Amino acid sequence: MKLFSPVQLGSLTLRNRIVFPPMSTKFAAADGTVTERMINYYEARAMGGAGLVTLEATYVHPSGNSFSRGLGLSDDRMIPGLKNMVSRLKKHGAKVSIQLQHGGRAANSAASGQAVLVVSSIPGVTSYTDTREISEEEIAMLISAWGDAAVRAREAGLDAIELHGAHGYLISQFFSPYTNHRQDAWGGSLENRMRFALEVYREVRRRVGDDFPITYRMSAVEGLAGGITLEDSQALSRALVAEGINGLHVSVGLRETNFMVSPPSCVPRGWNADLSRSIRESVNAAVPVIVAGRVTDEDVAERILEEEKADLVAMGRALIADPFLPDKLQNSHKPVIRCISCNEGCVGGSARGTGVGCALNPLSGMEKAYNLSPAAAPKKVMIIGAGPAGMEAALVAAKRGHKVTLVEKGPALGGLLESAALPPYKQDLTRIMNYYEKALALAGVHVRLNEEAGVDLVKSEAPDIVVLATGSQPVFPGFCRVPGAMTASDALHGADTGSNPLVLGGGLIGAETSDLLSEQGKHVTLLEMQPDIAKDMEGRTRRYLLLRLRERKTTVLTSTQVLEITPERAVRVKDPEGLERWIGPFSSVVVAVGYRSNRTLAHELSDAGIPFVTVGDCTRVGKIMTAIEAGFKAALSF
């Protein structure tokens, strides 16, 4: 594969074309220094075989810190920790870069303790109260700060530097006509808007020398009116190459369009590749071009490289899900944990402040937090239920040396995953089942399908440990039991809902079911008691889904309570003003008001005096991430 061929980045030779791109972890210490957790996280990606590991956005001046626990390189005291991290990463054969950044209007004043510096104060855009327009003197100071940080990076042993000119941070704020309304030499014309980026590059180059690789990350487009255009970015790319830049890293978006950055599964894989090709062609392929944007697997990556749309591929979330993806593809037949672009652990973890993680990999961001050594006394373990929690518990228990039997009443692994993969753009969920099918076989788990476990089976098998992962089942209120009523699962599996179905419940399941039915050309009415729908959905995924429902003219009734449903499926409701009225009749009623834990077997085992532990939805209804984490932790407890 071309993916695994060496490539030159300035004076640097990379072992392959896989880049682990900079993504904020929230793992730094409060003072911006490196922590052991951060080292362990990046070291796993270096050990796993990435050619270039790029450390996250690192502030060059305290005023530019954008994150509550952001990494910094604004002071010499930050060098030792960084030097230690770099040396540990390099032991595994990876080259290591660092992204130097200033947040500008995206800085976190609570973390930095300083006023937010903005390129221009723009009503309706500049939303902060504690802000100040950057003066000429501060511009000079910040350019110098980039040079100082670059020197520290070289002293710490970094192989390369990336200048962060993307995603609406300070350099791109100067470049974008959306955020730069200055009337001086730093704003107005394209030449003036490029000035800050070029001056930062020149200062960094002057300070580190001609032999040190420097790349530039850009938002080729910002995705909103008045923002950076592709033509702007092509011009900047040509100017940077003329100055001696060693590589260009193509992304998209800014804070107003952050749904374009790390987009969900409804966005095509490798979707930015045409943009990177345009940038690459604009500079006549004079320097290597890296592309980011749902490069989820080796097939997508290889196609981009073969079609010469880029020279390297940024596989961020793919390597968060499985840092050993490169090594597995080259050197073993071990199954790869495949990113499904759900954003629950990575983007979601960062947003929650808990730090980057992965819904499918509990060790991501927690690389050395658990004792995974073989069990001191291997046991006979029976796990009942092969949803995400049960499969993960079985896999980890088997890896620790236990003799594991996984019993599932259905014909296949996955539990509710099979239904969850049916709405539009959710097909990637099948990758989870594919992974566990291979991993469980490799680990030696005895899988028994089409077998319903009960007290008698447990007694006859006499396991030392029983783990219940019996999942959950749909809630179906009595007033919904009218002709033509069904569960969301029924509708997802193709039950006839007619031309104008009513979906009761606007949570994640109801919203996704409405998405599928509206895609089929049906006029869907979605009814929810709360003021908003899909509030339990990851934010970027939700944004795209709401847009699709709006485009298909789905009727959404929020803050609305159902009082009565007639056999003809006319529905009496109380509207947001407290008034009662009738709506319908509807061709069907699709019930999606939630799930409740299935604890039937738990009660039966308790009555029989058989000890057990519960994991996943049968303990508490949650998401894939909470189920897998519960199965993982349970398997470490015995």
Image (tube, rainbow, N blue to C red):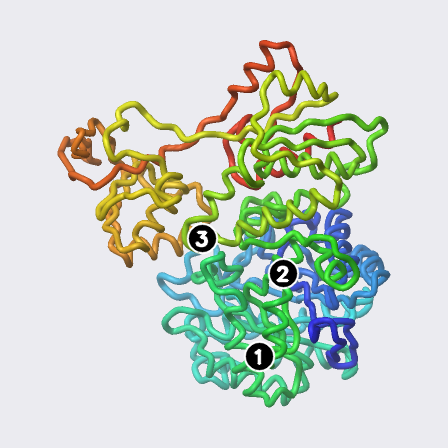
Question: Who comes first in sequence, dot 1 or dot 3?
Answer: 1
Q: Is residue 141 visible?
A: no
Inspect the image, locate mark 3, and give the three-letter code of the amino acid beneath it.
Answer: Thr
The circle drawn on residue 14 is none
Q: Is residue 447 visible?
A: yes
Quarter-of-image position of residue 480: top left
**Circle 3 sits on which residue?**
541
The circle drawn on residue 309 is 1
- Decide if residue 39 is on the left or right side of residue 22: right
**Label 1, label 3: how many angstroms apart (C-alpha)?**
27 Å
Residue ID at (58%, 56%): 66
User: Residue 351, position in %: x, y?
Assistant: 54, 48
Q: Secondary structure at mark 2?
A: helix
Q: Secondary structure at mark 3?
A: helix
Front residue of this view, candidates 621 and 598: 598
Residue ID at (79%, 76%): 13
Q: Secondary structure at mark 1?
A: loop
Mark in front: 1 vs 3: 1
**Circle 2 sits on which residue?**
316
User: Residue 353, position in %: x, y?
Assistant: 58, 45
Q: Few, some or many C-alpha atoms within 10 Å of disc 2 (few <14, some 14-19, many ≥20)?
A: many
Inspect the image, locate mark 2, and give the three-letter code of the amino acid beneath it.
Answer: Gly
Question: Who comes first in sequence, dot 2 or dot 3?
Answer: 2
